[in-house]
Image (cartoon, rainbow, N blue to C red):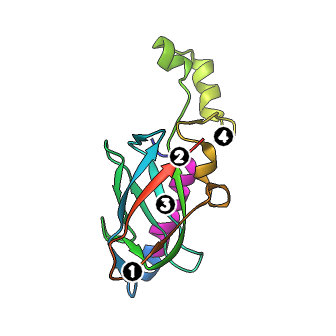
Amino acid sequence: MFSYRYRIILLFALLLNGCSGGAGVETVNVSGVVVYKGQPVSEANVAFLGDGKIRPAIAVTDEEGKFVLTTIRSGDGAVVGKHMVTVSKTIAPPTKAAATGSVSMEEAAKAAQETPAEAKILYLVPEKYSMPATSGLTFEVRDGEENNFEIKLED
């Protein structure tokens, strides 16, 4: 399940791509692995956000915690330069319907009215890594080098 922040980042990247058609953006291959408490993190959202002047790149980790970044086309990598990096893995809390298999019409209507801010999102890795201002993660993507990063998350 994608977090709301990840969806916004993805939408932003897609809008930028649609506006310029991707012309003139040069990327290099970028891959890596996300590890938390010594274990690979599967299904985590990874974003290399650049410095505000270059396009972001995104990925979702596989079962082994590995990722390959995408800027414009699937797996094309990231733009060369310094990147603020975010990692998130969230789930929505179980609903009464999920827990019991049924829900009343009133409860369904109430759930449909909830805004994302009212829903309690459960973070499966520390929440601080989901925002560039608090993640503390930065990596430099370099041309002509192997850009394979190990992202170690800590409590």
Tag 4: amino acid: Thr
Label 3 near label 1: C-beta < 8 Å?
Answer: no
Q: Earlier in the sequence, mark 2 or mark 4?
A: 2
Tag 1: amino acid: Gly
Left or right, 64 with reference to 52: left
Above or below for 144 versus 73: below
Instruction: Determine the secondary structure under disc 2.
Output: loop
Label 1, on which residue? 21
Mark 2 or 4: in front is 2
Q: Earlier in the sequence, mark 1 or mark 4?
A: 1
User: In the rendering, which numbered label is found on residue 115?
Assistant: 4
Q: CA distance from mark 3 to mark 2?
A: 12 Å
Q: CA distance from mark 1 to mark 4?
A: 33 Å
Tell me the residue at 58%/51% (across/down). 130
Where does the N terminus fall, quadrant-wise? top left
Q: CA distance from mark 1 to mark 3?
A: 21 Å
Label 3, on which residue? 47
Mark 3 or 2: in front is 3
Tell me the residue at 40%/57% (across/down). 59
Tell me the residue at 59%/32% (across/down). 112
Instruction: Determine the secondary structure under disc 1.
Output: loop
User: In the rendering, which numbered label is found on residue 3?
Assistant: 2
